[in-house]
Image (cartoon, rainbow, N blue to C red):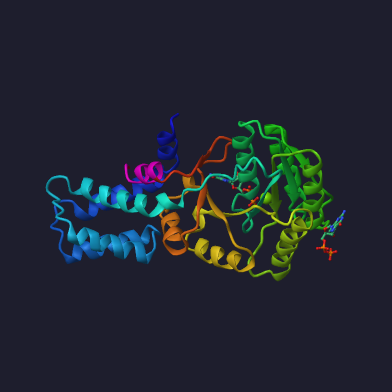
Amino acid sequence: MNIFKKFKSGLNKSSEKLSEGFKNLILKKNIDNLTLDSLEEFLIESDVGVETAEKLKQIFAKTKIDPQTDGLKQINKIVEKYIQDKMKPLEKKIIDNKNIKPKVLLIAGVNGVGKTTTIGKLGKILSKENNQIVFAAADTFRAAASDQLEVWSKKIGATIIKSDPGSDPASVAFKALEFSKKNNIDYLLIDTAGRLQNKKNLMDEFKKIVNVTKKIDSTAPHEIYLILDATTGQSAINQVEEFQKISPITGLIMTKLDGTAKGGILIAVSEKFNLPIIALGLGEKEDDMQLFDAQNFSKALMSG
Ligand code: GDP
Ligand code: GDP
Ligand code: MG
């Protein structure tokens, strides 16, 4: 499957909902103020955020949209272009500086967003380029977490460093980084426990992981990727705010876009924070992650 088709099938629910909604709103109607308001309201319901909905409404108002002929096409084009212009500057590659060994990627996010799965998928992408990879099972909070990561490590041929459930996550991170230095590893991906933003001890634990990696390499962690679950809607906004308070986030990965019709949330997050986007999770399987590409994303979303 080519990249566009991957995006398209992953974003199917969202794109269908958008095109269906637009069609119903503009079909044979004149584009008057009432229609414009309905369009804005519909966009807000699709989770793109109030700001984006307002800006799009203004562009609709300025454009001569003819619902009798190709009005739907015009609307789709406007939204597609808006998303692409907004999100193109947010494209960011996974760090690939050959001089840094290991490149330490710390994976953050609340419980169940897809951190462990994302580490597996990222590992798969990186291992294709002949990189040596280590996973650190620093989610020692849930007993099954390191088993889950171990399954992924076997699947993609990564080494896993783990510890007993309940042990200090910072110590797992420390051991894993020590091991990775010694063995000339290219990438160290550190899994973490679901940090409920309101649980102070989990947040402190996260800070401790960051600090302990710096003991070995003062430039680590080189990236902190925040994982967001598209199906949780507007609470993603709140999660970005809370995590930014502990540590600067260097990239976002949004998961489960295949499982929701409200993929617009990625646009709302982008409008609000302008954070780089690394990849999108478009399914549960190992190849169901796409490195972020604004053009394919916006085209796929608006081609329902
Ligand atoms: P964690 O608690 O953050 O580590 O989350 P997990 O990696 O354990 O994932 C939680 C659930 O979400 C699992 O059932 C995953 O298979 C599922 N999941 C993760 N990413 C995606 C995705 O992109 N699409 C879908 N449909 N499911 C996903
Ligand atoms: P502490 O738990 O209050 O001592 O917090 P630290 O931030 O100093 O360290 C966190 C964890 O990282 C510790 O529990 C250790 O397991 C591990 N760690 C830190 N420094 C070292 C070190 O120099 N050697 C080893 N082996 N582990 C360390
Ligand atoms: Mg996990």
Q: Point out residue 204 in the picture as x, y percentages from the top left corner.
A: 72, 67
The image quadrant that residue 148 belongs to is top right
| Residue at figure coordinates x 71%, y 61% from the top left | 206
In the picture, the quarter occupied by the N terminus is top left
Q: Is residue 17 left or right of residue 227?
A: left
Q: Please name whichever residue, 225 or 167, is drawn nearer the observer in this view of the structure.
A: 225
The image quadrant that residue 242 belongs to is bottom right
Q: Please name whichever residue, 104 or 134, is drawn nearer the observer in this view of the structure.
A: 104
**183 w.r.t. 86: above or below:** above
What secondary structure is the magenta-colored segment mainly?
helix
Is residue 7 inside the magenta stretch?
no
| Residue at figure coordinates x 67%, y 42% from the top left | 99
| Residue at figure coordinates x 79%, y 38% from the top left | 183
The image quadrant that residue 262 belongs to is bottom left
Q: Point out residue 91 in the picture as x, y percentages from the top left corner.
A: 47, 48
Is residue 296 inside the magenta stretch?
yes
In the picture, the quarter occupied by the C terminus is top left
Ligand 2: quadrant of the figure: bottom right
Q: Is residue 238 left or right of residue 188?
A: left
- Give, as a single range, the part of the protein colored magenta: 295-303
Q: Point out residue 43 in the picture as x, y percentages from the top left corner.
A: 33, 59
Q: Is residue 107 left or right of residue 299?
A: right
Q: Is residue 283 left or right of residue 161?
A: left
Q: Point out residue 225 in the picture as x, y percentages from the top left corner.
A: 60, 53
